[in-house]
Amino acid sequence: MFPPLATALMIANPYLLYLTDIYEVTLRNELAHNWLHLHLMITGCLYFWPLLGTDPMPNRLQHPLRMVLIMITLPFHAFLGVTIMGSPTLIAEDWYLAFQRAWPPSPLADQEIAGGIMWATGDLTMAVIMGVFFHRWWADSRREAIREDRRLDREERLAALAAAAETTEPVETEPEYHADATTTRGRRPSDEDDR
């Protein structure tokens, strides 16, 4: 995974969709519409998996870099929502005016509402994502602290054992002797032979 590329796609996709003619093409063509859904889902997975996923992966970004990538996308999506809200022209105008809708709101007012929803839900979604992100960061930090404590405890035990082994000098031991019923208590077998 290359998170900066996924971040660029996450930022660029909605702009390319709504500020070009691609959106109207996806409204008129079912295959393009389905492909758009698949494309957005794959882009979302490529973006969020390295940032929030718990699966092991090579070269996972550190938490501060992940936070930067999340924070970068936030204003772009909010800005797009505000742009759509303030647009004097209707996106996919031919498509929506062909319905000759008689009920309120007008298609342009409806687009303004949609831009506001995009702005608000984008911010709300990112707030939830930031909450999940900080919870994962905290949990990962706790796990790392426990792992580091265990490692330090293990090193301390090994150092204590090594120090104890260095200070212990070998003690001369006397030959072992056994007392039994026929010998006097405390005599060595070699003493019996001398008798």
Image (tube, rainbow, N blue to C red):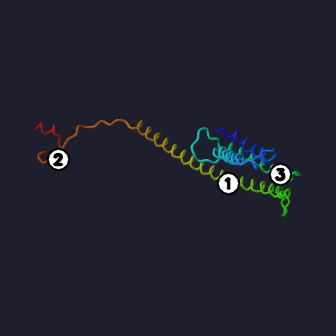
Which is more N-terminal, label 1 or label 2? 1
Q: Which mark is residue 131?
A: 1
**Quadrant of image for the N terminus:** top right
Q: Residues under labels 2 and 3: Cα distance?
A: 105 Å
Q: Which mark is residue 185?
A: 2
**Quadrant of image for the C terminus:** top left
Which is more N-terminal, label 3 or label 1? 3
Marks 2,3: beta carbons within 8 A: no
- The residue depicted at 71 percent of the width and 44 percent of the height is 69
Question: Callout 1, which amino acid?
Answer: Gly
Residue 75 picture location, percent across and down: 78, 48
- The residue depicted at 71 percent of the width and 54 percent of the height is 125
Number of numbered labels in the structure image? 3
Q: Residues under labels 2 and 1: Cα distance?
A: 79 Å
Q: Secondary structure at mark 2?
A: loop
Q: Residues within 10 Å of mark 3 (few under 14, many from 20)?
A: many
Q: Which mark is residue 94?
A: none
Q: Nearer the viewer, mark 2 or mark 3?
A: 3
Question: 28 or 45, which lies in front?
Answer: 28
Q: Residues under labels 1 and 3: Cα distance?
A: 27 Å
Question: Callout 2, which amino acid?
Answer: Arg
Marks 1,3: beta carbons within 8 A: no
- The residue depicted at 73 percent of the width and 56 percent of the height is 124
Which is more N-terminal, label 3 or label 2? 3
Residue 60 picture location, percent across and down: 62, 41
Q: Secondary structure at mark 3?
A: helix
Residue 16 picture location, percent across and down: 78, 43
Q: Which mark is residue 84?
A: 3
Q: Nearer the viewer, mark 2 or mark 1?
A: 1
Q: Is residue 11 left or right of residue 102?
A: left
Q: Residues within 10 Å of mark 1 (few under 14, many from 20)?
A: few
Q: Secondary structure at mark 1?
A: helix
